[in-house]
Each structure stands twice: as C-alpha cells, then as structure tokens.
Image: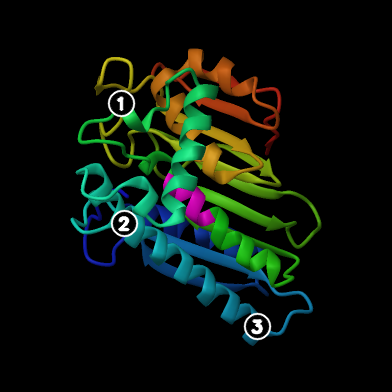
Amino acid sequence: MKEPTGPGSSEAPDDVARADRTVRSAHPGALVHDEAVMGTVCSFLVLPGAVATEEVRTAIADACTILHQADATFSTWVDDSPLSRHRRGELALTDCPDEVAEVLRLAAVARRATAGWFDPWALPGGVDPTGLVKGWAVERAADVLADAGVPGGLVNAGGDIATVGRAGDGDAWRIGIRHPWRPDALACVLAVTGAVATSGTYERGAHLVDPHTRRPWCAAASATVTGPSLALADAFATALAVGGDEAFDLIEAVDGYACYLVRPDGSERVGAGIDVRS
C-alpha cells in the first residue's frame, strides 16, 4: 500500500471531506462512517432501507476489518507484512495468505489487458500491486454491505469508489471527478452503477512509473475508469494515467469498462460507456 502522510490521516483530507459533504447532503437519511486506513480515509455512506441500524453498523465494522486486514497483508511500508517478505524472497507465494495470490492473479489479468501499461512486476523493489490492492479491498468491503441487504451505498477510499445498489431516487450514483488543476471544481459528474477509480499526479505528485521504461512518467492530468470491478478499474486507471491514449484504446476494448481522460494540455477524451451528467 502507499505511504501514509501521517498517523491515521488522509493523504487529502480536505478533498475527501468536501466530496463526502456533497454526497451526504443529498442523502440525509444515510448512515455514514469514516475510517483511517491504507494511508487515506475510507468513507462509508449506506442507505439502510429496511435493514436495522445495528445490522448496518455491524456490516460497516466488518467491512472496516477487511480493509485493515488488506493493509496489514499488502503494505510495502511494513517490513514484516506478507507482501514485503515475499518481495524480499523470504516468503514463497504458496506460504503467503491466499489473498496475495488472488491479487497477483488479477494483476496479471490487468497487465495482459493493458499490454503492460499496468505491470506490478516492472516496478522498483519487487512486485508491487499497490495500483490494484486498494480497489480490491474496497470492493470486498462493499460486498459486505451488499450481503447485509442494504438497498444502496458507497465506499470511497480516496477517490476509488465502489457502489452498492442504487441511489435513494433509484437512479445511478452521481460521482464527481475532481478537476486536476482547480481543487474546488469538478471536471465532470459521472453516473455510476458499478465502480469508478481515478488516478493522476495532482494529489501525490510524480509517483507513477512507466513499466516499459521503469522511469517516472504520467501521460494524463486525470485518468478515470468505470466498470464492474473496482480492483480492475483501479489498475486500469493507473494504466490510463501512464499510457494515455494508447492505454485508453486497450481499456475500452475490455467488456464493461470505460475511460475518461484529461490530457496534460487540458483536452478531454470521453469513452463510449461514460455517462456524463450535469
């Protein structure tokens, strides 16, 4: 996982708070919770429907446990995490928790689909699936809410968002994508019924690496991918940020996934499956 910016803090707490205030004001009857984990703040918004409040809170607590377990398993900043030990050759993949093999299998799927624009095996220091793990963990957390029977909800970890069901009006969830140069503005608002992930350099600076050259590189001011799986959308968004238009075409060829790209010059490219709302 990525390096935290401070004990129990978000990498961009003001941005998370601003986005959540907007969503929460539109759903005053929702149950909400914020959890500091994975170097960010993971925000829950749940429409309880007929599910008892205590059952919803239990589901949220169980979902948070999944997030913390993922952090403990995959952190590259904790020396004795299973992934860190595997990267150093101290722990065979067969001796790691099963989740490690599952995540690396998905990473291999994303690597093939993007022709290597997403490639955790090409990063410095050993295999690093950070670009997929957060989405994978948030997706599993959202599954806990769905299993509890709630009619709708959002799990948002620093802009990687898994949806559950529908918004209170029965429509798709409206997800605002932050403008890459104007922190108080949105680049667009998307209608989402699955997952959405955004990658870029405007929050964390130049942290992306071109797997082909193994050098820092970013071909996008903002790269967003929607699709049924947040794990893959997260990986694809990383690939889109690094590969730009070339990765765009590859991701759009994957059934169910769509891209929204803001290039460094400010021009935009909107995929056929992107539903932009006012």
Q: Are marks 2 and 1 in contact (CB under 8 Å)?
A: no
Nearest the eye: 105 or 137: 105
Percent x, y of residue 46 = 63, 69
SS majority, magenta: helix
Crowding near the residue tagged with mark 1, few <14, some 14–19, many ≥20 C-alpha atoms within 10 Å: some
Residue at x-position 55% and y-position 23%: 113
Measure the alpha-carbon separation of dots 2 and 1: 23 Å
Q: Amino acid at mark 1?
A: Ala
Percent x, y of residue 139 = 56, 54
- Residue 46 in view here: yes
Pointer 2 or 1: first along the chain:
2
Q: Amino acid at mark 3?
A: Glu
**Picture disc at residue 209:** none
Label 3 sits on residue? 55
Secondary structure of the residue carrying tag 2 is: loop
Residue at x-position 35% and y-position 54%: 95
| Left or right side of 205 for 253 | right
Secondary structure of the residue carrying tag 1 is: helix
Query: What residue range appears in magenta?
Result: 133-138
Foreground: disc 3 or disc 1: 1
Nearest the eye: 268 or 134: 134
- Residue 186 in view here: no
Q: Are marks 3 and 1 in contact (CB under 8 Å)?
A: no
Crowding near the residue tagged with mark 3, few <14, some 14–19, many ≥20 C-alpha atoms within 10 Å: some
The quarter holding residue 47 reads bottom right
Residue at x-position 25% and y-position 21%: 214
Pointer 2 or 3: first along the chain:
2
Percent x, y of residue 94 = 39, 49
Q: Amino acid at mark 2?
A: Gly
Label 2 sits on residue? 39
Crowding near the residue tagged with mark 2, few <14, some 14–19, many ≥20 C-alpha atoms within 10 Å: many
